[in-house]
Image (cartoon, helix red, strand yellow):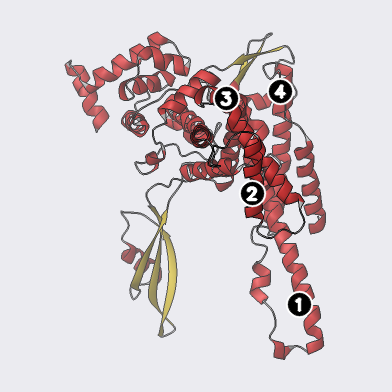
């Protein structure tokens, strides 16, 4: 396929996705659910084909050929030909930029589709009412024709109350790869929240040595030749011996350089961006619904604050409507003072009333806290929920609602899980009805879960949501009733797991002590 045709076709397909409105109304209906799921799956297959075609055509490094040959020296070409060469060079650079940009959009769109599909798969289990077969997780993809394998199309949807999902972020994901457009639409305060969330998801693990570069000297044709060799890192390997076995006994090792890999919590840049955008826009949308009510209760006189803001907007508009103004800021202040005077918001000295000044500071503080904290709380709570209620093997094999999520985290990455603001959690509970709780030392809770997983590895013991709820109860100082409610699981099962954990930590019988010795090896 011609390159311009491929780019044009890809752009048209992405623009088609952009025009399609994603609706979550009646999503609990099997027909509506499968329609949306099939649409996203179909898009994903098309995007995957596009990406493979682009990578085969060298879109991953479009500037390489230009950089390799570069521009000719002025003395090598006639002066009258330099213009044509420059014009052609500009054309090739524009073409290379188009390749890079379209591949970037396709990758972003794929990441967003992965996230959306993962959240839908966590949300529902579909059951055939004829043969009673249940489809969950990636098995739902078998129902793209909206029929069970028994050819019956009478399906029932069960909402997975134990699942970790937030379907409301799906309409805000850059499904068409337009993440730059969506970023530009964020308010300044939401943009700051977006950056802080990306930083949290990029929290890196301590460096792991993956490869070793060696500079060696070998004898070839009677003379010493230097070579650079790259080997996979292995603590048990003697690199000097390895080099001599491969290049002969005369080979000499001159230098070693270790290359460390530092994987992030979400180990993909496009997924980090898409998740952060989705959560920030969703939180922003929710805050708009209750902000007026909260300000009414928090401010001394909300009506006067609104009057001040209206006066500020009017003064700003009047200055901007003038074509040429010397010192526009001074003029705006003069107009604003006049507006405030007319509306009775200034004291006898022409200064803004102190109650309004105090309310303006309080309003700014509330908005800043809400717009920055709520999206952070949402995504960190969902990550904690997912880590606590799933096993290491499941996180390692199935991407779920968080593609490229690290199955386990080290102490450095756990620093991203900073404690929530208690007051904001209370606002979320009161105004949004979310099942979110303040958990002191969240990093310690996750550290305990990973520690238990490491100890129980290879023992073939079931590690379900109940175990995570029990760990949260012990390490997070929450009641068993509260953790069972938060994770929507049976109270008795959580209580049983908590007792098992406490027994393991303090073995009484000889058998229990032997089991603990086995676990701790």
Pinpoint residue 212: horizontal percent, then vertical percent.
Answer: 39, 61
Q: Which residue is mark 4?
A: 34
Residue in the image at 37% along x and 40% along y:
415
Which residue is identified by label 3? 122
Mark 1, other Cα within 10 Å: few <14 / some 14–19 / many ≥20 = few
Q: Nearer the viewer, mark 3 or mark 2?
A: 2
Query: What SS does tag 2 mark?
Result: helix
Place residue 308 in its image quadrant. top right
Q: Earlier in the sequence, mark 2 or mark 1?
A: 1
Q: Residue at x 81, y 79 (%)?
A: 84
Question: Which mark sits nearer the N-terminus, 4 or 2?
Answer: 4
Q: Which residue is mark 2?
A: 334
Place residue 179 in its image quadrant: top right
Q: Quadrant of the N terminus?
A: bottom right
Tag 4, which secondary structure?
A: helix
How far apart marks 1 and 4 lie (CA) works out to: 53 Å
Front-most of residues 238 and 506: 506
Question: Toward the viewer: 443 or 297?
Answer: 297
- Marks 2 and 1 close (CB-CB < 8 Å): no
Mark 1 sits on what residue? 86
The image quadrant of residue 278 is top right
Q: Position of residue 197 (x, y in %)?
A: 51, 41
CA distance separating discs 1 and 3: 54 Å
> Residue 500: x and y, percent?
29, 16
Does residue 173 appear anywhere in the picture? no
Instruction: Kindly indicate whether the residue at mark 4 contacts the one at mark 3 (C-beta within 8 angstroms).
Output: no
Of callouts 3 and 4, the N-terminal one: 4
How much space separates mark 4 and mark 2, taking CA atoms?
Answer: 60 Å
């Amino acid at each position: 396929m011609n390159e311009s045709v491929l780019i044009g076709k890809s752009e048209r397909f992405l623009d088609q996705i952009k025009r399609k409105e994603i609706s979550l109304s009646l999503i609990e209906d099997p027909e509506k659910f499968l329609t949306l799921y099939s649409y996203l799956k179909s898009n994903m297959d098309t995007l995957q084909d596009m990406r493979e075609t682009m990578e085969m055509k060298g879109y991953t490094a479009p500037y390489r050929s230009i950089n390799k040959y570069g521009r000719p020296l002025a003395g090598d070409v006639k002066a009258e030909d330099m213009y044509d060469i420059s014009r052609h060079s500009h054309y090739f650079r524009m073409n290379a930029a188009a390749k890079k940009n379209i591949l970037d959009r396709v990758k972003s769109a794929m990441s967003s589709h992965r996230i959306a599909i993962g959240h839908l798969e966590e949300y529902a289990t579909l059951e055939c009412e004829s043969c009673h077969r249940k489809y969950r997780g990636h098995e739902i993809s078998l129902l793209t024709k909206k029929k069970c394998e028994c050819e019956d199309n009478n399906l029932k949807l069960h909402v997975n109350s134990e699942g970790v999902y937030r379907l409301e972020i799906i309409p805000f994901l850059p499904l068409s790869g337009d993440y730059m457009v969506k970023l530009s639409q964020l308010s300044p305060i939401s943009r700051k929240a977006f950056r802080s969330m990306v930083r949290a998801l990029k929290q890196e693990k301590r460096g792991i040595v993956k490869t070793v570069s060696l500079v060696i000297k070998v004898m070839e044709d009677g003379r010493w030749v230097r070579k650079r060799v790259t080997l996979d890192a292995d603590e048990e390997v003697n690199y000097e011996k390895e080099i001599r076995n491969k290049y002969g006994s005369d080979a000499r090792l001159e230098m070693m350089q270790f290359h460390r890999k530092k994987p992030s919590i979400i180990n993909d840049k496009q997924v980090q961006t898409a998740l952060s955008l989705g959560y920030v826009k969703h939180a922003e949308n929710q805050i708009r619904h209750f902000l007026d009510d909260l300000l009414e209760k928090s401010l001394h006189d909300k009506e006067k604050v609104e009057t001040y803001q209206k006066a500020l907007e009017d003064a700003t508009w009047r200055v901007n409507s003038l074509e040429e103004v010397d010192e526009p800021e001074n003029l705006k202040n003069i107009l604003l003072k006049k507006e405030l005077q007319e509306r009775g918001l200034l004291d006898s000295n022409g200064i803004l009333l102190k109650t309004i000044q105090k309310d303006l500071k309080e309003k700014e503080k509330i908005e800043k806290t809400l717009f920055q904290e709520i999206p952070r709380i949402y995504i960190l709570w969902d990550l904690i929920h997912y880590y606590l209620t799933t096993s290491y093997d499941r996180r390692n094999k199935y991407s779920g609602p968080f593609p490229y999520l690290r199955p386990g985290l080290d102490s450095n990455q756990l620093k991203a899980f900073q404690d929530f603001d208690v007051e904001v959690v209370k606002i979320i509970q009161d105004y949004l009805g979310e099942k979110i709780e303040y958990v002191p030392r969240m990093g310690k809770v996750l550290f305990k879960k990973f520690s238990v997983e490491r100890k129980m590895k290879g023992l073939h013991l079931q590690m379900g949501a109940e175990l995570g709820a029990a760990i949260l109860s012990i390490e997070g100082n929450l009641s068993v009733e509260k953790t069972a409610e938060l994770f929507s699981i049976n109270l008795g099962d959580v209580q049983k797991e908590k007792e098992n954990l406490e027994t393991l930590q303090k073995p009484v019988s000889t058998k229990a002590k032997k089991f603990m010795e086995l676990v701790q090896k």
